[in-house]
Image (cartoon, rainbow, N blue to C red):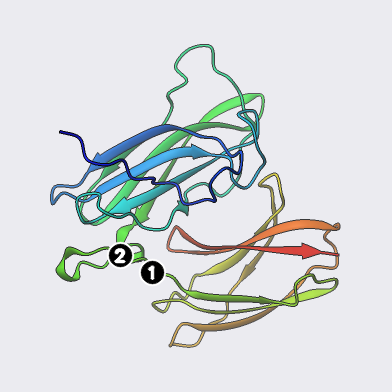
Amino acid sequence: SWSTPIRVNDDPLSNGIEQDMVWADFSPSGKLSVGWRDRRLNGTGVNAPFDIYAAVSANAASTFSSNFRVTSVASPYFLLEQGNSFIGCAMSDSDLYLNWGDYRNSPDWDIYFNRIDLSNVITSAKDTLTVAKPFIELFPNPAKQSIQVSLSLPHDHPTSEIIIFNSVGQTMKTVALSANHSGEYLQQIGISELTSGIYYLFVRSNNSYYGNITFVKE
């Protein structure tokens, strides 16, 4: 018999955001990964631009990690007349692999691939699921000239960077992080050149994304 359904996407209920094109795979030890098309950063309705998101379970799908964004740029929606199930997902015990097609370089529909190191998502102690949730704080918010970003990653990542996206998923600013050996960061970022509106801040490290901090540029 079937178990009680579990909701995998963790955005708020009844928010009008469409998720679809789901694909999943098991690792050799039984961990489960799920990937899908998601519009939570880009508006309501099926025609909104989309990203690819994923989540992982290490306990037979009893619980899932927080959702994490796989794409770095949103794609405009485009209905393929044929072959619209365009996500592939594979999983080992150490990595998650996702490939997908998108329309970011319109009029070309291109194929993309990303590998996610599961050590940034799962700890294997007693095979229970925990999410590597770094502390990230942004202030002031709203802001006019600059923002201060304070964060602590779970490990020292010397190649980490802060990325700011606009509301349609375009990369507006990328700032390399200067870290000490403890993984603690404090970064001031000038935003005076950005137009007024809503922006999203992520930290990218080892091909994984953390954060999704929303702020307003006045």
| Marked residue nearer the N-terminal end (1 or 2) | 2
Q: Residue furthest top?
A: 81
Callout 2 secondary element: helix
State the image coordinates of residue 212 (x, y, percent, origin top left). 58, 60
Q: Residue 105, located in which quarter of the rendered image?
A: top right
Q: Which residue is mark 1?
A: 132
Image position of 94 with respect to 135: above or below = above
Q: Nearer the viewer, residue 154 or 99?
A: 154
Q: Is residue 13 left or right of residue 41?
A: left
Residue, x 69% and y 48% (percent of image)?
A: 170
Q: Tell whether label 2 touches label 1 (CB within 8 Å).
A: yes
Q: Is residue 181 left or right of residue 194?
A: left
In the image, what residue type sits under mark 1? Ala
Residue, x 44% and y 74% (percent of image)?
A: 157
Image position of 185 with respect to 47: above or below = below
- Packing grade of label 2 (10 A; few <14, some 14-19, many >=20) is few
Residue, x 37% and y 50% (percent of image)?
A: 55
